[in-house]
Image: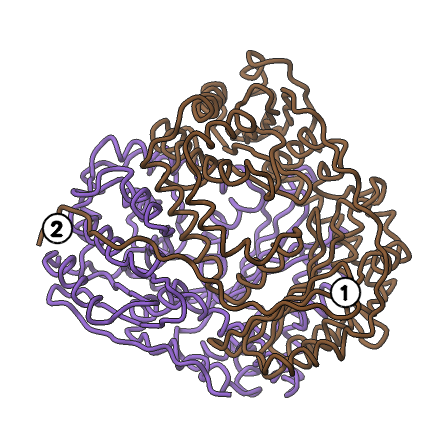
């Protein structure tokens, strides 16, 4: 079977903004996707939650598109939109009927050029973010343990370990000056990648990009944050008493490899063998075999990232919800037994073939929408400088052999370097 | 070039459905085929008219558990074999139940279509509900239920459906630990044998298929000898008269109050459906909506403030949904109620109408950008008993809605005087704020 090829046309505007165009005319839909090199890991002490607060500010209006216009204009042109904040970037998209492409570009350019940063918008969005924190974290079981506590346990460098959603104290302390400075530093064209994918005409798209973004001035590039993580000499473990949870869960993590190295590819396949789909070892041996685990999720970069946006230093981590007839240390022992089996017995060729087929089809599904194609292209340009990975990385993953998986298990899934957070319902105290 | 003015663009294109070939096997199995060669994949849906509304009250969860167990063992394949075969063909295979139907969703790399059809036929026709798989599913479902009950939103949805639909089975969102305990292997097999009949099913297959004749032969070879049979009638579509009730679910430690306000509304076939759909979008169905701009952006009461129209086959509900900090519960409810009254009292503006109509039309096309999206929509439409053309006419019908129709529909279904109110939160912190609104019944979140 021939693998899919996503077309890529990449160039840079004089102001330093990188542009990727990818045409596909099968559905009359186009996506405008813009990714900024501004993530939570770049935040300063005393300013936690800033990248996310700023993402909110991006929807509060700009010079020619006053407050409320962004939502209304996208929706009145039949489109949908959103933005999201991540450890290493913040991204925004508009998915539109393809003859409405200019609308998305105009809106993105107007807010990159002249965002409306004022006290009223800031106060209002501080409240919205606090509400979001209450809704999505403070009022949810597991969420506070995952978002606030887990990074502190898994990392030592503050840049990596602080809360991505931020504290109420830091949010309250944010001033209009801070926001304006953040905007100048991080939301400059030379710190962004613009991707347009879907049913587009390349010459027309180029013209629109030049017209709307061409005159936005570049800024001095911000220094990249120092994310260096000291080596982990010993296992770390902690118990978290969750007042909202009713079923126990355990989080387990191991420091992961550098992005795009052979070890990275091996870890992607290793994770697939352990946790990918119903035929995976966790499903068959822990959910079915020992009947101890109820649900699980795992990823290179869990909980905030996956292989597409994992950036080192990072952690290969998992969360397992388990039957209260067991204890967290028993679940940990079962997980490590699965890892030990992999290290001792290696990988069965048939099992590997099966998981390769699973991976191949998952990838095709991922490439179906213009939005997910755009997001992959943008992330691979920003994180790797190589959008071509969208076409080549599957081959890299599929080429990983049993020996490399075996070696990765030994090198990375080392009990001496693990981090464990056992979440127990507080009422069991 | 004037950068201060938004660009002028052409009108939205009208959506054309890709050609759908529809036929029926001699045993009554409805088949829909769509050729889509963009990606080397195939997607299938096999849907049955037997959702949770057929569950006897004491066996709540019967349809859901039957669906979950279909892929856990057949006369010739163990659960593990099914999982391994599915992975090997680059596939997915799972069955889920909803209030009206039980839907098997499957996909695979296109080259593996025959193996995918084998698996679909085997699990729907020959599932045999192994004892140990049934026991494990029951145990884990009970734990999942405990986990779900630690979420405020789960309680809010559950009590809202109870308030709106009780005693109709639509009022039961989830099973109980007791009803799960009663789900024996025999009951599951009985539900399957009773309800999974070809003459009450729809099979959607789309993707990079072989030619039509060959595809039909492949389907007929696996489903043609499946005997048709009568299935039980759905429970009577009788629903209580809407009336104002206020339920407070006490969840100690809640830092927010989770609010639902709404009532029974309409099905997709009701003449009021499209006016209500557009009206709901204007009120709270999108980011440019009134609830979003007032409750979230202007008042700052909530992060999420939206409304929802949830049509089912025999009825439907309308609700507004938000989560606010405890101190502002009373003014937030007041603001929600005022918005619900306003849309029933005055015509929406031409700009709001156009925005909502375009948003719905565009969103419809975006939803069917993927094979899975299109397959799901086709299956859903057929399971509701609607023709495939419903999809093509959708945009047109959205666009023909007029302000007067929205106001009339809102007067009937959105106006809050007979709406149920459900609040989930810490009663010690918010109980008093609710007292001014009416008589409150309090239940414990346990």
Chain letter for the brown colouring in the rendering: B
As drawn, A375 above or below A281? above
Residue shown at the point (77%, 69%) measured from the top left: B123
As drawn, A120 above or below A382? above
Q: Is residue B303 left or right of residue A219?
A: right
Q: Is residue B283 left or right of residue A40?
A: right
Q: Quadrant of residue A104?
A: bottom left
Q: Quadrant of residue A334?
A: bottom right
Q: Which residue is mark 2?
A: B3
| Other residues around mark 2 within 10 Å, as few (<14) / some (14–19) / many (≥20) | few
Residue shown at the point (27%, 35%) measured from the top left: A122
Q: According to the rendering, which colour does chain A have?
A: purple
* Numbered label attached to residue B28: 1
Q: Is residue A203 left or right of residue B269?
A: left
Residue shown at the point (28%, 35%) measured from the top left: A173
Q: Nearer the viewer, mark 1 or mark 2?
A: 1
Q: Are marks 1 and 2 in contact (CB under 8 Å)?
A: no
Q: Which part of the image, by quadrant, shows the C terminus of chain B?
A: top right
Q: Is residue A48 visible?
A: no
Q: Which part of the image, by quadrant, shows the N terminus of chain B?
A: bottom left
As drawn, A170 above or below B110? above
Give me the chain letter of mark 1: B
| Other residues around mark 1 within 10 Å, as few (<14) / some (14–19) / many (≥20) | some
């Amino acid at each position: 079977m021939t693998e899919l090829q996503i077309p890529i046309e990449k160039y840079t505007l004089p102001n330093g903004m990188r542009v990727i165009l990818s045409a596909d005319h099968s559905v009359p839909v186009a996506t405008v996707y813009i990714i900024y090199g501004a993530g939570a890991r770049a935040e300063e002490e005393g300013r936690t939650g800033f990248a996310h607060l700023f993402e909110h500010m991006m929807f509060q209006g700009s010079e020619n598109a006053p407050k409320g216009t962004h939502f209304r204009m996208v929706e009145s042109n039949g489109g949908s939109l959103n933005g999201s904040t991540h450890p290493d970037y913040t991204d925004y998209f508009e998915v539109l009927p393809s003859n409405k492409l200019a609308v998305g570009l105009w809106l993105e350019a107007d807010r990159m050029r002249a965002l409306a940063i004022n006290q009223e918008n800031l106060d209002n969005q501080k409240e919205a973010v606090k509400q979001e924190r209450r809704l999505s974290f403070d009022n949810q079981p597991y969420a506070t343990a995952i978002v606030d506590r887990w990074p502190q346990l898994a990392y030592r460098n503050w840049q990596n370990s602080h809360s991505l959603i931020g504290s109420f104290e830091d949010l309250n302390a944010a001033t209009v000056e801070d926001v304006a400075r953040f905007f100048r530093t991080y939301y400059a064209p030379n710190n962004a990648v613009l991707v347009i994918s879907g049913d587009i005409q390349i010459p027309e798209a180029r013209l629109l990009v030049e017209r709307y973004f061409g005159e936005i001035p570049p800024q001095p590039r911000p220094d990249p944050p120092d994310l260096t993580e000291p080596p982990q000499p010993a296992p770390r473990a902690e118990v978290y008493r969750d007042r909202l949870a009713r079923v126990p869960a355990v989080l387990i993590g191991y420091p992961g490899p550098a992005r795009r190295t052979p070890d990275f590819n091996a870890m992607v396949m290793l994770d697939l063998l352990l946790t990918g789909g119903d035929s995976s070892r966790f499903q068959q041996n822990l959910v079915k075999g020992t009947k101890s685990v109820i649900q699980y999720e795992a990823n290179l970069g869990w909980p905030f990232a996956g292989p597409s946006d994992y950036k080192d230093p990072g952690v290969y981590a998992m969360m397992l919800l388990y039957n209260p007839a067991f204890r967290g240390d028993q679940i940990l022992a079962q997980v490590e037994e699965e890892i030990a089996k992999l290290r001792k017995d290696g990988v069965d060729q048939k099992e590997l073939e099966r998981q390769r087929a699973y991976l191949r089809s998952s990838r095709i599904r991922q490439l179906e929408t213009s939005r997910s194609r755009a997001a992959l292209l943008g992330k691979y340009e920003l994180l790797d400088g190589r959008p071509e990975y969208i076409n080549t990385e599957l081959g890299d993953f599929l080429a990983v052999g049993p020996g490399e998986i075996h070696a990765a298990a030994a090198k990375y899934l080392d009990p001496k370097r693990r981090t464990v957070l056992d979440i127990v319902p507080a009422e069991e105290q | 070039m004037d950068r201060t003015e938004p660009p002028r663009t052409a009108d939205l294109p009208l959506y054309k459905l890709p050609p759908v070939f529809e036929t029926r096997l001699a045993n009554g199995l409805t088949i829909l085929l769509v050729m889509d060669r963009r990606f080397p994949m195939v997607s299938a849906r096999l849907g049955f008219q037997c959702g949770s509304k057929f569950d006897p009250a004491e066996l709540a969860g019967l349809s859901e558990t039957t669906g979950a167990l279909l892929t856990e063992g057949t006369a010739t394949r163990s659960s593990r074999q099914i999982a391994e075969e599915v992975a090997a063909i680059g596939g997915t295979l799972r069955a889920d139940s909803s209030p009206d139907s039980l839907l098997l969703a499957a996909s695979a790399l296109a080259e593996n279509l025959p193996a995918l059809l084998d698996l679909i036929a085997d699990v729907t026709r020959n599932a045999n509900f192994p004892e140990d798989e049934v026991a494990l599913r029951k145990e884990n479902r009970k734990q999942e239920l405990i986990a779900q009950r630690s979420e405020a939103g789960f309680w809010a949805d559950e009590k809202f459906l109870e308030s709106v639909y009780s005693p109709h089975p639509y009022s039961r969102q989830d099973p109980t630990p007791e009803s799960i305990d009663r789900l024996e292997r025999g009951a599951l097999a009985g539900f399957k044998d009773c309800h999974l009949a070809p003459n009450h099913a729809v099979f959607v297959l789309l993707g990079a298929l072989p030619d039509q004749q060959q595809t039909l032969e492949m389907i007929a070879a696996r489903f043609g000898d499946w005997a048709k049979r009568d299935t039980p009638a759905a429970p009577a579509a009788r629903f209580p008269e809407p009336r104002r009730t206020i339920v407070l679910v006490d969840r100690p430690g809640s830092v927010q109050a989770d609010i639902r306000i709404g009532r029974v509304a309409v099905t997709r076939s009701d003449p009021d459906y499209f006016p209500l759909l557009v009206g709901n979008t204007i009120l709270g169905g999108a980011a440019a909506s009134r609830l979003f701009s007032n409750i979230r952006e202007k008042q700052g009461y909530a992060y999420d403030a939206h409304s929802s129209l949830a049509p089912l086959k025999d009825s439907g509900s309308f609700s507004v949904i938000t989560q606010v900090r405890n101190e502002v519960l009373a003014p937030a409810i007041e603001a929600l109620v005022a918005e619900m009254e306003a849309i029933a009292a005055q015509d929406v503006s031409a700009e709001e109408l156009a925005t909502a109509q375009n948003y719905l039309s565009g969103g419809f096309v975006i939803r069917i950008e993927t094979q899975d999206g299109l397959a799901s929509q086709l299956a859903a439409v057929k399971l509701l008993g609607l023709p495939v053309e419903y999809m093509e006419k959708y945009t047109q019908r959205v666009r023909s809605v007029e302000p007067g129709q929205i106001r009339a529909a809102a007067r009937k279904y959105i106006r809050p005087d007979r709406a149920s109110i459900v609040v989930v939160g810490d009663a010690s912190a918010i109980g008093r704020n609710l007292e001014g609104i009416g008589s409150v019944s309090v239940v414990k979140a346990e």
